[in-house]
Structure formats: structure tokens, C-alpha cells
Image (cartoon, rainbow, N blue to C red):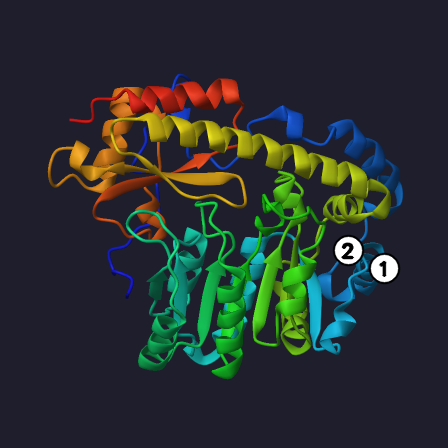
């Protein structure tokens, strides 16, 4: 499918400019449970000790070989298994990294991208800013179920001359992870056709049924020279004020990324680097894994409660089969609303009738003519979230 020229990812037109305090933003992206946060005093004490000698220094990405060596040693990062063809770099955040990577790959305006949707809207905006003609492949059905056919992907690759695939893992906002064999098949296909694949693995470390890990070692071992992998432990820990991102790819691309970063983002802050070292250090590993475990247990519990409420509803609501991350999707049958209502109309109807703010997942290229899908942030406390879901189920949508 090709992106409509009228597509708009912005959500500002959905909600009031000044949102009243009694409105509940169920599709929010921030942390909403203080029990998961790392004690700020822990950071302040560590960072203050470093401030005296580092506050006047520059920290450019291409000069920080010692941080890269430090991470390899602390996390037993065995990239040697890849015969030194795979390297990594450190970025301030995933969005900056993605923008830099896409601009490098789009030299001479040669990118023809395929987005596995739904997808993080920033990728759409970055590609449009780079004058790319965007194709997308919906990996979720109208009923929110996982579907994947490598033959359909290959057909698109050949027909549209695709040379870049972008995938979020888990599938953006849904909590659904790509089947591991399908992922390996996709990676092999990209290598066969010499296509780059960018995997946004930002919430991939929060898989519900696997062992928690500091780095996504399994997928790192599976990637090849055509892969760009973005991951962020700080994002999983909700350290959004001092987050960092790791970029894994072939050594040649990493060199280009680090060279470009000098004039694209300049120096990183010392506080970012120190937070980076604190969360990846061996001495804090138990604490970090404990927090990740608490987050995972909490969101799973909220998900099961919401799943039960949806199954008991007489309105035919659907919920995605989550396996990772902190979000799920709820689908409301469009037949419950007046005919010919758009997703934006439905979002406003829900807001007016319940004071609940929802973002239509069609903004992220979720394709469904029969259901209104929206994202739910599972990090809210149960006391806040569950009553809002219950209130939503009581609405007369007509």
C-alpha cells in the first residue's frame, strides 16, 4: 500500500488546547507509576560526584571509544561472533539516530522504503522530510491479529524496488511481537535482495515470556550487515530526561553515523553518559533487572484485567494478544457508532462522552474499516486505569 498524500500524523486537532484536569489520556506515552522509577537521589549522588571534572568537557560520539569498550566488557557483548562485521554506537535518543541513519542511506534520494505497520509516526515524518515515496505493509489484520506472509513482502520488494524496510518490535503500540521465525526469514530476505532493514527494538527488552536482559543478545546474534538495530534500556526504564540509544549495524555504516553525528548533534551531555554507565554497569544490574521485572509484572496484570473486562462486554470489543512492551490496543466495533464516522470523529465522541482521550491507531497506519483501534498505556496504576476502562465500556456510542 502507498501512503496517502493527505496523511497527517499530528494529534493536536483531536484534543482541546488546554486539556482539563478531569480528562484521562489513556493513550499517553509517559510513565504513570512512581513505583517503577529509579530513586532520583541515587542518580544525583552519582552524577554530582562526576560534575567537578566533566562539566567543561566535550563528548563527541566518534571519540568515545572507551565507552564502547567499557560496554563490551561490562555486558559481555560478544560481537566477535559476527566476525567483527557488526559494530555499535551511542546516540542521545532513537529519533536522532533514525533521522541520521535515514539521511545517510538516502544519499542521492535513492531510498524506496517499506514500513511494516502500524509504525511509529516519526519514521513517516522523517521519510517525508527526505522526499521518499512511502509504501507500507499492514502486519495486523482489521481484527488486530498478527499476519505475515514473506511472499507478499518479496512481491512488494520486486514491484516497488524497495531498498529499506522499517519495523518496530514489538509492533508499534500493540504489544504484539513478530514471530521469531518470520523475523529471521525477513532478515534473510533482506540479505538476499541486499536491502537494509531498520529494526526499532526500543521496547523489545520487555518481552513478557522471556528472561529479562540488559541487552537484546538473541537478536544481536541474528542480525547481519544489512540490519540496523536501535535499542534503549533507558527508554524501558522511563529515563526520558536523560535517555540514550544504542545503534548496531555493519562497521562501515557505524563509521558514517559517527562521522555525521559530530555536526548533526554535536557533543552529548556528560549526564547522559553517566546515566548510560549507571544503568549498564555490572554493579547495578540486579537493581535494573528488578525494576524491569516490576514494570513487566505490573503491565501484564493490567492487561489481564482489561482483557477480562473486554471479554465480558456485550459490545464486541477486541484487544490485541500482547507479548511485550507497555501498550496494548483496544478495538471498538465501528457499527456501534453512527454510519460514516471517521476515526477522528470517533475519538472526539469518546472524549465528549467519557472525558477519555484516545489516539486513533490509524494515525500509525493501522488499517481497519470495521474497528476503531486505540492504544492503552498499561503503566498506569490499576486504581486509575481499570475504572476508566470500565467507564469506557458503559458508553452509549450512538
> Could you tell me which residue is drawn at 78 percent across and 66 percent down?
78
Label number found at residue 73: 1
> Could you tell me which residue is drawn at 53 percent across and 76 percent down?
188
Q: Which residue is mark 2?
A: 58
> Could you tell me which residue is drawn at 34 percent across and 45 percent down?
361
In the picture, the quarter occupied by the N terminus is bottom left
Above or below for 197 versus 44:
below
In the picture, the quarter occupied by the C terminus is top left
Label number found at residue 13: none
**2 or 1: mark nearer the eye:** 1
| Labels 2 and 1: the sequence-earlier one | 2
Where residue 41 sits in the image (x, y, percent)?
78, 27
307 displayed left or right of 51: left
Q: Are marks 2 and 1 in contact (CB under 8 Å)?
A: no
Nearest the eye: 263 or 228:
228
Where residue 237 sits in the image (x, y, percent)?
65, 39
Q: Quadrant of residue 38?
A: top right
Q: Is residue 125 visible?
A: yes
Nearest the eye: 277 or 374:
374
| Disc 1 element | helix
66 displayed left or right of 33: right
Above or below for 51 versus 45:
below
Q: Quadrant of residue 4?
A: bottom left
Amino acid at each position: 500500500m502507498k501512503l496517502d498524500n493527505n496523511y497527517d500524523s499530528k494529534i493536536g486537532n483531536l484534543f482541546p488546547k488546554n486539556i482539563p484536569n478531569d480528562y484521562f489520556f489513556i493513550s499517553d506515552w509517559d510513565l504513570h507509576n512512581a513505583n517503577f522509577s529509579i530513586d532520583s537521589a541515587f542518580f544525583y549522588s552519582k552524577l554530582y560526584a562526576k560534575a567537578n571534572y566533566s562539566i567543561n568537557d566535550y563528548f563527541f560520539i566518534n571519540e568515545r571509544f572507551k565507552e564502547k569498550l567499557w560496554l563490551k566488557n561490562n555486558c559481555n557483548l560478544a560481537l566477535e561472533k559476527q566476525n567483527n562485521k557488526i559494530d555499535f554506537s551511542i546516540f542521545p535518543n532513537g529519533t536522532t539516530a533514525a533521522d541520521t541513519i535515514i539521511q545517510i542511506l538516502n544519499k542521492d534520494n535513492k531510498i524506496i522504503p517499506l514500513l511494516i505497520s502500524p509504525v511509529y509516526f516519526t519514521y513517516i515524518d522523517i521519510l517525508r522530510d527526505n522526499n521518499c515515496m512511502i509504501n507500507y505493509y499492514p502486519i495486523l489484520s482489521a481484527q488486530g491479529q498478527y499476519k505475515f506472509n514473506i511472499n507478499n513482502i518479496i512481491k512488494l520488494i520486486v514491484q516497488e524496488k524497495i531498498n529499506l524496510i522499517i519495523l518496530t518490535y514489538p509492533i508499534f503500540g500493540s504489544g504484539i511481537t513478530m514471530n521469531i521465525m518470520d523475523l529471521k526469514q525477513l532478515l534473510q530476505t533482506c540479505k538476499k535482495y541486499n536491502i537494509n532493514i531498520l529494526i526499532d527494538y526500543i521496547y523489545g527488552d520487555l518481552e513478557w515470556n522471556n528472561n529479562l536482559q540488559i541487552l537484546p543478545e538473541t537478536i544481536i546474534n541474528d542480525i547481519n550487515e544489512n540490519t540496523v538495530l536501535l535499542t534503549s534500556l533507558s527508554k524501558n526504564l522511563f529515563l526520558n530526561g536523560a535517555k540514550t540509544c544504542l545503534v548496531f549495524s555493519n562497521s562501515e555504516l557505524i563509521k558514517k553515523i559517527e562521522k555525521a553525528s559530530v555536526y548533526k548533534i554535536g557533543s552529548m551531555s556528560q549526564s547522559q553518559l553517566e546515566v548510560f554507565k549507571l544503568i549498564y554497569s555490572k554493579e547495578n544490574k540486579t537493581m535494573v533487572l528488578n525494576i524491569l521485572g516490576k514494570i513487566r509484572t505490573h503491565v501484564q496484570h493490567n492487561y489481564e484485567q482489561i482483557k477480562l473486562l473486554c471479554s465480558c462486554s456485550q459490545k464486541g470489543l477486541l484487544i490485541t494478544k500482547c507479548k511485550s512492551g507497555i501498550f496494548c490496543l483496544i478495538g471498538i466495533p465501528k457499527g456501534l457508532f453512527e454510519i460514516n464516522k471517521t476515526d477522528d470523529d470517533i475519538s472526539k465522541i469518546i472524549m465528549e462522552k467519557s472525558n477519555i482521550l484516545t489516539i486513533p491507531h490509524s494515525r500509525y497506519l493501522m488499517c481497519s474499516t470495521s474497528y476503531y483501534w486505540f492504544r492503552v498505556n498499561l503503566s498506569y496504576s490499576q486504581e486509575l486505569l481499570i475504572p476508566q476502562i470500565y467507564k469506557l465500556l458503559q458508553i452509549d456510542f450512538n
